[in-house]
Amino acid sequence: EYTPVKLNEKVLDHDETIRPDTSLDALGQLKPVFKENGRVTAGNSSPLTDGASMVLLANQQKLDDLDLTPLAYLGAYAEI
């Protein structure tokens, strides 16, 4: 699920790695990035920005105050 985030004056509201103008021909022309004759190219590898995430932990009162619907509940946790 993608949630728009405002950062300074810019709104991040879409996945920048999806490129509708990409073609199979263009992907086939990309050179390997790590070793000669390698298989990893800029077209088939994860971007450097891959893996960003955010978690908001809140009690029921705060959810009600902000009119939010949780996507999951934390049932228990432990510290060692």
Image: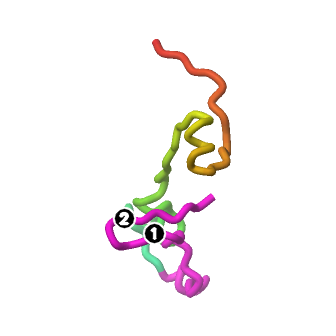
**The residue positioned farthest toward the left in the image shown:** 8
Q: Residue at x 49, y 48 (%)?
A: 54
Residue 56 location in percent, x, y? Answer: 52, 43
From the image, tell me which residue sits under label 1. Answer: 12
Q: Is residue 67 above or below residue 25?
A: above
Q: Is residue 27 magenta?
A: yes
Query: Which residue corresponds to the image point at 38% horizontal and 61% vertical from the top-left?
Result: 34
- Nearer-the-camera pick, 35 or 33: 33
| Residue at 59% over, 83% down | 20
Near-viewer residue (28 or 1):
1
In the image, residue 59 above or below residue 56: above
Work out whether residue 80 or residue 11 is closer to the camera in this orientation and state it: 11
The quarter of the picture where the N terminus appears is bottom right
Q: Determine whether the residue tagged by mark 1 lies in a helix, strand or loop.
A: strand
Identified by mark 2, the residue type is Leu
Q: Magenta segment, which residues?
A: 1-29
Q: Which residue is mark 2?
A: 7
Q: Residues within 10 Å of mark 1 (few under 14, many from 20)?
A: few
The percent coordinates of residue 5 (x first, y second) are 46, 63
- Pointers 2 and 1 in contact (C-beta within 8 Å): yes
Magenta span includes 6:
yes
